[in-house]
Amino acid sequence: MSAQVSDQKVLTGGFQMNRQVRSLIALNLIGGTAVLVSYAFGLGSESSVGDALWGGVPDGLRPLYTVNMFLAAAGYFLFTPYIFFKLRPETTRIAGRFGYGLFHILYALVLFPSAIWLQLTELMIAQPSAWMWAVVRLDLACVGLGALGLLIALLKLDSPAPRGRTLAVIGLLPFCLQTAVLDATVWPAFFPFPGH
């Protein structure tokens, strides 16, 4: 048994992986896979609406979206390992009120709405309605709020925060720009939905 624990400590950077960390990793694997599958299926299908997904976003803004998508993806791989492997669930406190379990809620808000956004938008484009437009907006708002929640949670970690928090926060900045500003605010403002 002790050899098994020792092997696990080597694999997890010197500490035995907590049950909450394992469940958060599982949530990310399931949610992240769902996001990738939804994009592969949505953009690769014959029914894909392609350019219509841009809505009315001006051509001049599109390069910002493209560049920031890569920065946001890179940022995800800066802040997520920090949350997985630097924070100890048993001692993590956020703003003196919340524990490590808050990260499960925030990641779920980011990942699962992200996994259905493309299909919801394609459906709304195919059959426009005020109701579907509201659902798409709510979906994007959930992702943006989850991302902002992650940023606030890292900023509000009760001291002393483990080393590496600054890099994790830097990684969250383009992620929040993408989800909370470009996707949830700018894109809907330019989308040519009748009556909006």
Image (cartoon, rainbow, N blue to C red):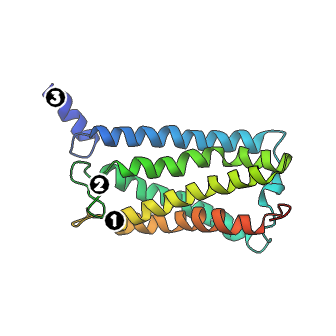
Are there few (<14), some (14-19), or many (20+) residues within 10 Å of tag 2?
A: some
Q: As shown in the figure, which amino acid type bears the numbered disc 3? A: Ala
Q: Nearer the viewer, residue 153 or 66?
A: 153
| Residue tagged 3 | 3
Are there few (<14), some (14-19), or many (20+) residues within 10 Å of tag 1?
A: some
Q: Is residue 145 left or right of residue 170?
A: right
Q: Residue at x 21, y 53 (%)?
A: 91
Q: Residue at x 81, y 44 (%)?
A: 48
Q: Nearer the viewer, mark 3 or mark 2?
A: 2
Secondary structure of the residue carrying numbered label 3: helix
Secondary structure of the residue carrying numbered label 2: loop
Are there few (<14), some (14-19), or many (20+) residues within 10 Å of tag 3?
A: few
Residue 108: which disc? Answer: none
| Residue tagged 1 | 165
Residue 86: which disc? Answer: 2
State whether residue 160 is above or below residue 17.
below
Q: Residue at x 33, y 67 (%)?
A: 156
Mark 3 or mark 2: whose residue is earlier in sequence? 3
Q: As shown in the figure, which amino acid type bears the numbered disc 1? A: Arg
Q: Residue at x 61, y 68 (%)?
A: 181
Q: As shown in the figure, which amino acid type bears the numbered disc 2? A: Lys
In x, y percent, where is residue 7?
Answer: 22, 33
Q: Nearer the viewer, mark 1 or mark 3?
A: 1
